[in-house]
Image: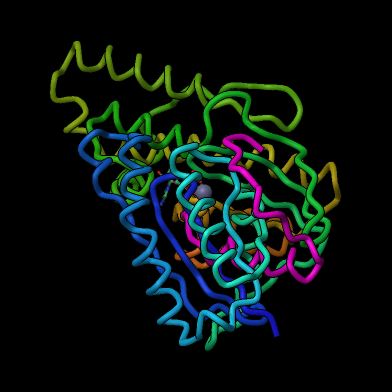
Amino acid sequence: MAIILGIESSCDDTSAAVIKDGVLLSNVIANQSVHEFYGGVIPELASRAHQQNIIPVVSMAIKTANIKKSEISAIAFTRGPGLMGSLLVGVSFAKGFAKSINVPMVEVNHLQGHILAHFLDEKDKKNPHPRFPFLCLLVSGGHTQLVVVKDYLNFEIIGKTIDDAAGEAFDKCAKVMGLPYPGGPVIDKLAKEGNANVFEFARPVVGGLDYSFSGLKTSFLYFLRDKIAENPDFIEENKADLCASLQHTIIQILLKNLIKASKQTGIEEIAISGGVSANSGLRNALTDEGKRKGWNIYLPPLKFTTDNAAMIAITGYFKYLNNQTCGYDVTPMTRM
Ligand code: KG4
Ligand code: ZN
């Protein structure tokens, strides 16, 4: 029997989860509302909020899982990538706790965690697991990657963004429209009321399977600047169509390389992961494309798309079974 406590603190969510033999018993997340006021994550404030949240969040995860501290086999934690001040809180806490109960630590790459969230089973619900090898489009606030997942712990990145991540494109364009942070879910909601074919935005072209989103953001900004010069109420009057058209453009960019990657690799088991995989337009577009192409599509449950410790605990579980523990001298890494 293996019981893994997972801890996630890479950005602005403090989270702890407990997994017993691959089954999720608890997953507690404390979101930090302090950043909304600033329209983005302020690293120093995130670090301080993690310090306030970490003990109650871990206590709650253990209590909800109905386990004793002494039953924990190992503590898995996000080593990176992420914000240094945020990672430090989770890593330091994991160290102190692991030492105090004398269990090994398992370092987890946050991005692997997002991908392995597809293997999370719940007490009353077994989720569909992709079969190896599968192709995963990982789309979050900090990363956009096309990954061939050969096994639980064997990944190959075959495409990535050369500038902004897809989530950043959502968030930055939302900010330009005066929408609250994080903009992705807000655009998703507004897009449902709009027409995606009203406006056209630039689709930057890069070689191979790589992505680029900074051109889209700039073209969106200049487009709005010109329109506002003619009509100061342009954004307000066209908000839903702007969101729908922008979201459609981002989805088309994402799907184009995913289709290419499937063709190149011959892989037809297709998954998406990360915060942007919560996007309803992306989920629908991928489902439709999957039907056309005969792909098996894997959409993670919504609660496992954005940052959470359940994905860290399941990754830690696979690494623990593989004897991949680390020493108490481990340090966080902002890039991995
Ligand atoms: O994976 P995540 O929680 O954190 C990182 O590891 O970055 O992803 C956060 C990103 C943000 O950019 C947020 O706007 C985006 O995911 N996001 C969405 C949606 N929900 C979250 N983007 C589009 N549509 C959504 N429904
Ligand atoms: Zn993330």
Q: Residue at x 59, y 61 (%)?
A: 312
Instruction: Judge by depth and name the residue closer to the eye, 325 or 42.
Output: 325
- Residue 258 in the image: x percent, y percent? 69, 43
Instruction: Judge by depth and name the residue closer to the eye, 186 or 54.
Output: 54
Instruction: Judge by depth and name the residue closer to the eye, 325 or 18.
Output: 325
Q: Residue at x 68, y 80 (%)?
A: 2
Total label count? 0
Reply above or below: 35 against 286. Answer: above
Q: Residue at x 54, y 86 (%)?
A: 123
Does the segment drawn in magenta span residue 322?
A: yes
- Residue 75 in the image: x percent, y percent? 60, 66
Which quarter of the figure has residue 237? top left
Q: How is the image coloured?
A: rainbow
Would residue 195 be seen by someone viewing this image from the given angle? no
Does the segment drawn in magenta span residue 289?
A: no
Instruction: Judge by depth and name the residue closer to the eye, 249 or 63.
Output: 63
Reply above or below: 320 against 268. Answer: below
Quadrant in the picture for the C terminus: top right
Reply above or below: 163 against 179. Answer: above
Region rendered in magenta: 307-336
Q: Residue at x 31, y 49 (%)?
A: 49
Which quarter of the figure has residue 20? bottom right
> Would you say 145 lies left or right of 185 here?
right
Would residue 110 be seen by someone viewing this image from the given angle? yes
Quadrant in the picture for the N terminus: bottom right
